[in-house]
Image (spheres, rainbow, N blue to C red):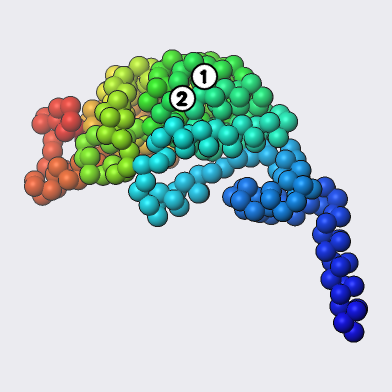
Amino acid sequence: MAEEEEETKSVQIRNWAELTQLCLVNILSHLSIEDRWRGAMFVCRSWLQACKDPNLNSVIDLEAQFIQSVAESSSTRYWNREFESKIDSMVRSVVIWSDGSLNFVRVRHCSNRSIALIAERSLNLQVLSIQRCPHVTDETMSKIASGCPLLRELDISFCYQISHKSLALIGQHCPNLRILRRNLMTQVNPSQQEPFVPREYVDTCPQDGDSEAAAIGKFMPQLVQLELQFSKLTNKGLALISEGCINLEHLDLFGCTNVTSLDIANASSNMKQLKTLKKPHLCLESQTERYGHWQLYDDRFQTDFFRI
């Protein structure tokens, strides 16, 4: 009886060890990227090779891991160069292993090095989300514009070295773009800011909101979703967006304190497809507590920081 059990065990072990790459890839596809990178890759050489299969590397999505880690700890390590290099290394590996099949990237805290490689080797890229990348610049985003013409969703929130120049190029070269997220960090109430974000980085928040709005309105007419939280755009920029992006269905202006209720009403009249609109006044909750209610602010008293 004992001999039969041992024989059965050896057969099971042998079967796992001798699985074809196709079977291994199918099994590994049910694991999260975190499980593959922290466990499966280190089982044996055949599992490592399976993890490098292009079918497992068409997507890299680390957003859930970042959200979870931020909720559990407020560490400054995400903003240093050492952590950035680790993310770059992971992204570069996926890009190389994808063999041109990469179409979905959602990461944070990477640099120009990995973004440039994505632009060079990912012609089929459709989704690019690179929130909180302090060292990604216009130079590299221009490569994304020319190298990834199928892009349909872009998130460059909190990337402060990316300017209106990149928005213009993306709009000109990526006609399929439908979703743009260009959210900034709040400067109205610093206590609401993530405590581990370097203060000097928050202070570099782009001030050319109207230039960015002009690029969006002129070069991104097919947008259906636009997020501009805490942008510095004014009525002029909002008007340009409403004139150029008439297909917008979802518009997020939370924290945009330089536009008034009247500005928003006028702009909305051009966007007939609009389904949801987040207005900016909610960010002023702390300022309006002493007055009882935000509606006490009339457009006559709104200037700059205190517009709603």
Picture coordinates of residue 274, whole percent (x, y): 42, 35
On residue 140, the disc is: 1
Residue type at mark 2 is Val
- In the image, 110 versus 274, the foreground residue is 110
- In the image, 238 versus 204, the foreground residue is 204
Picture coordinates of residue 41, whole percent (x, y): 69, 48
- In the image, 269 versus 33, the foreground residue is 33
Tag 2, which secondary structure? loop
Tell me which residue sits at (47%, 46%) in the image. 66
Q: Residues within 10 Å of mark 2 (few under 14, many from 20)?
A: many
Residue type at mark 1 is Thr
Which of the 4 quarters of the picture holds residue 11? bottom right
Q: Residues within 10 Å of mark 1 (few under 14, many from 20)?
A: many
Res. 226 visible in picture: no
Picture coordinates of residue 118, whole percent (x, y): 61, 26
Quarter that holds the C terminus: top left
Identify the residue position indicated by label 2 in the image: 136
Tell me which residue sits at (30%, 25%) in the image. 204
Res. 118 visible in picture: yes
Tell me which residue sits at (65%, 36%) in the image. 94
* Distance between mark 2 and mark 1 Cα atoms: 7 Å
Which of the 4 quarters of the picture holds residue 121? top right
Look at the numbered discs 2 and 1 and tell me whether their residues touch, using CB distance below 8 Å. yes
Tag 1, which secondary structure? helix
